[in-house]
Amino acid sequence: MPKSKALSLHVGVNAVDPKHYAGWKGELHCAEQDAVDMAALAKGSGMKHKVLHTKAATRVAVLKALEEAGKQLKNGDFFLLTFSGHGGQVLDVSGDELDLMDQTWCLHDGQLIDDEVFAEIGCFAKGVRVLVIVDASPSGSVLRPYMPEPDPPPAGKRARLMPPLIADKVYRQNMKFYDALQKKVRNDATDENGPDVIAWLGCQYNQAALEGKENGALTEQVLYLWNQGSFLGPYLKFFMHLIAHMPSTQTPLMHTYGEGNAMLMQPAFKP
C-alpha cells in the first residue's frame, strides 16, 4: 500500500507593511520563530514543509501555496497549516457572518479573509486530512465561528490582534479591495465531499492569543507537549492536554469539519 503524502505550510508574520495598514506596523517578536519551530515538527514527522516569513508571507504566496497543496493531495493524504501573527477584521458584505465582520489573518501586504482560507481548504479532495493551528486572535473566527471583541490582554502581555480602531482604518482605506474579494470568493462549507479538518484555534472568542518569550503561547505548548515526537496519543488527547497547559487567560478552541471527528482518534501529527 503506497505511503500517504504529507505536506505542511507554516506562516509567521512579525511585521506588516504600514502602507496597506494605515501606518500600523503590527510588530511581533515570535511569529517567525513559531513558523520555524512548527516546520521542524513537521519535518520530524515526515512532512514536506514550506515556510513563509513576514515579507514573503503575502496574500498571493499563501493562497498559491494552499492551492498547490490541494492539487497534490488525495484521499488519505495529510496537510498541516499553521499561522502565527495578528488577527483582524473587515466588514462583512457577503452576509455570511453573524457579527457582520469577516475575520482575517494579517499577512504582510494585506489581510487574508477567513472566507478565502475556507474556500481553498474546501477545494481539497475528499478524505484529505487537514490540521489547522492558528496562533493569532481573534483566532477562533478564521474558520468561521462567531466572535465578539476579545477582552484586553493581561498587563505586560502582547496580544496578537490588530487593534479595532486600526482595523477600522485599514478597512476604510482599502474598502473597495476587501469588498470585491468577499463578493468573488467561493463561499462553500466543507462537507462530506471535501477534506476532513481539525482546527485548533488560539483562544476563546472573548480572549486574545498572546506572545511568550520565544513562541506564541499556543505554539509554545504545542511544541512542549509534542516533545520532539514523544507524544503518542490521538489528537483529542493532545488537545485536552493542550487546554490543561495553557494559562487561564487563553483557552484554545477546537472545531472539526467533514469527518474531522473521526480524525480526532488518529495519532497526533502522524501522517
Image (cartoon, grey):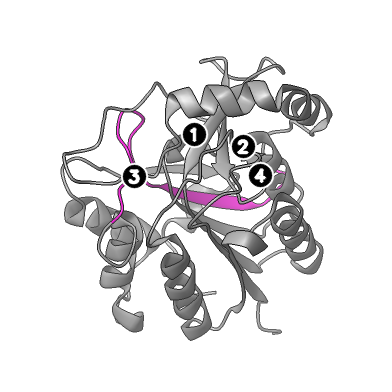
User: In the image, 197: left or right of 227?
Assistant: right
Residue at the disc numbered 4: 117
C-alpha distance separating marks 1 and 2: 7 Å
Q: Could you tell which of marks 4 and 1 lies nearer the N-terminus?
A: 4
Q: Nearer the viewer, residue 48 or 183?
A: 183
- Residue flagged by tag 3: what amino acid is it? Ala
- Residue 199 in the image, given as x and y percentages of width and height: 48, 48
What residue is shown with label 2? 114
- Check whether the beta carbons of the residues at disc 1 and disc 2 lie within 8 A of each other: yes
Cα separation between marks 2 and 3: 17 Å
Report the magenta residues as a range.
192-211
Q: Amino acid at mark 1?
A: Ser
Which residue in the structure is indicated by mark 3? 209
**Residue 172 vs residue 113, the one in the foreground:** 172
Q: Are marks 2 and 4 in contact (CB under 8 Å)?
A: yes
First of labels 3, 1 by sequence position: 1
Q: Amino acid at mark 4?
A: Val
- Give the secondary structure at mark 2: helix
Quarter of the image for the C terminus: give it.
Answer: bottom right
Considering only order in the chain, which callout, 3 or 2, is on the residue closer to the N terminus? 2
Q: Is residue 146 visible?
A: no
